[in-house]
Amino acid sequence: MIRRFAVVAFAMLGFAGMSATAHADEVSARAVWTKYWTAIEVQKICNNTAFSQSQYDNMVHRINERVNYDLGAGTLHQLQSDAKTTAHDLTFKYGCNSQEARDYLTLFQNDLAPVAGQ
């Protein structure tokens, strides 16, 4: 009886640990995805850039590779909206020459511009 209880308790503890790890991975993936999409939005605002659908597809593929395809479409839509708001707030309040905006532009140039064909 005690042995069975120990096995069940150990299994539940392992499941809880996996759940916490999965949650941490999703939180990390959300942060990465938002950062990359904010970089796209800052690029659009600061450099008056327009992207074609194939360029967006290539950039989304690159971002999804970075997060291991861990996020669903509904989540991505919300993250895109949040990133767009963040980019507009950042560029409106601090301008495109602020350090944070330059960091996003550097991220875009280093990771996304090559796949976007820029």
Image (cartoon, grey):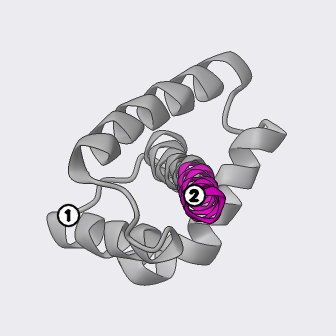
Residue 52 sits above or below residue 27 on the image: below
Question: Could you tell me residue 69's position as x and y percent?
Answer: 37, 70
Q: Secondary structure at mark 2?
A: loop
Residue that carries the numbered disc 1 in the rendered image: 52
Magenta stretch encompasses residue 84: no
Q: Position of residue 75 (x, y in %)?
A: 32, 42
Identified by mark 2, the residue type is Met
Report helix, strand or loop for mark 1. Answer: loop
Characterize the local packing of mark 1: few (<14), some (14-19) or many (20 or more) Cα atoms within 10 angstroms: few
20 or 39: nearer the viewer: 20
Residue 107 lies, in percent from the top left, at: 65, 63
Q: Is residue 101 left or right of residue 63?
A: right
Residue at image coords 74%, 49%: 102
Q: Earlier in the sequence, mark 1 or mark 2?
A: 2
Tell me where residue 13 sits by quadrant: bottom right
Amino acid on which disc 1 is placed? Ser
Q: Is residue 108 left or right of residue 104?
A: left
How far from the left and from the top, in percent, is residue 26?
A: 51, 52
Where is the N terminus found, in terms of image quarters?
bottom right
